[in-house]
Image (spheres, helix red, strand yellow):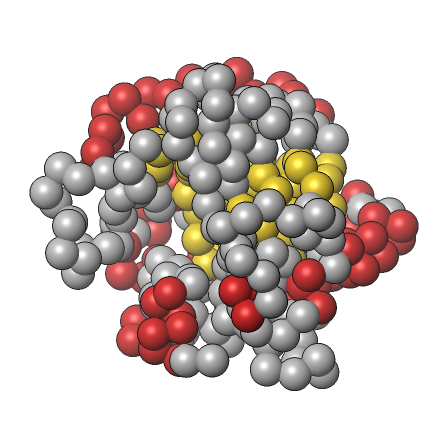
Amino acid sequence: MNNLEIDITKTEDFCKKINLDSKVLSKAQKDFLNEEGYLIIPPNDFIKKNLNFLNEISNKLIDSEGTNGGWDGKEQNESYGKGIPFEPGTNRLGNLIEKHPFFRKLLILPEVITAAKEVIKYDIKLSGFTLRNPLKNSGHQAYHIDGLPRKNKNEPFHGVLCAIFLDDSTSENGSTRIIPKSHKKLGYPDEYINPEQSQKNEIRANLKAGSMLILNINTWHAGSKNLDGKPRKSIFIQIKRRDEAQLLNYKKYLKKSTLQELSGPLKYLLAVRDNDPTQDEMSIGPGAEYRKKFGK
């Protein structure tokens, strides 16, 4: 472990090492995120400059991985390795850290880290890093949250999900539906609504390519059916409290060569240093799997 890694003992140290400018989000934006449970951010200069390249490497990976895409870390599933798509009708990519070094630059975007700190208010770590692209007549999701519901209103929020849209997101190709302020409710969406149905108070995140959508992971949201078949690739970055399980146990699923390539700050964010505790027994997916293990 080098000195740069030793120097990072908490998230504030991490932020200093990456020269985080927390003013990248205004007070009004932070207040909106806290009150509404989501925030839309226009394309920043880095995304604008690299959008074509991100699309290029993503499309190549989708073609090369085929039905194997998205299965990273899920070898215990009975369908693993049988040529069955992880999500039928949808292109998926998992563990983007391993797929191309350039993806790693997205993990320290100041908007992402600042939003995570604002919502979580605790030391943070990466939980998941994936890509999803629903194909024509596919992509519909029930309303869901991306983690455990809070048990009471005094319990702090557990994480954020950042979606970076590599293509335009429209009502025709299945833009994300969101129910504002729903993060304040306790429990799962299906305890309040029929999650398969549209809701009167939902909004659609119709966004230009390069935009970011930040969600409190307790905000009710859902993908929609891609009606016109145009691509709608989104890269998802989930960041959670440092004392909670990751969606993918990066200590287990990163190659030694990849670990050697990572900077000290990225090793901290991924919790892959020698002194970072492992939580392999808790590294399970959201939704039904959480409910199955932990109950309501």
Q: Nearer the viewer, residue 59 or 183?
A: 183
**Residue 47 pos. (x, y %):** 62, 27
**Against 231, is 31 above or below?**
below
Is any atom of residue 25 visible in this view? Answer: yes
**Against 225, is 150 above or below?**
below
**Against 88, is 185 above or below?**
below
- Give the residue at x 42% y 62%: 286
Determine which quarter of the picture holds residue 76: bottom left
Is any atom of residue 2 visible in this view? Answer: no
- Give the residue at x 83% y 48%: 29
- Give the residue at x 48% y 23%: 227
Determine which quarter of the picture holds residue 176: top right
**Residue 131 pos. (x, y %):** 42, 37
- In the picture, measured across the screen, residue 40 lies left or right of residue 290, that is right
**Residue 251 pos. (x, y %):** 32, 61
Q: Nearer the viewer, residue 105 or 129?
A: 129
Count of numbered circles in the view: 0
Q: Which of 109 and 164 is in front in this view?
A: 164
| Quarter of the N terminus within the rendering | bottom left
- In the picture, measured across the screen, residue 26 lies left or right of residue 69, that is right
Q: Which of 127 and 182 is in front in this view?
A: 182
- Give the residue at x 52% y 37%: 224
- In the picture, measured across the screen, residue 167 lies left or right of residue 42, that is left
**Residue lying farthest to the left in this orientation:** 82
**Against 55, is 65 above or below?**
below
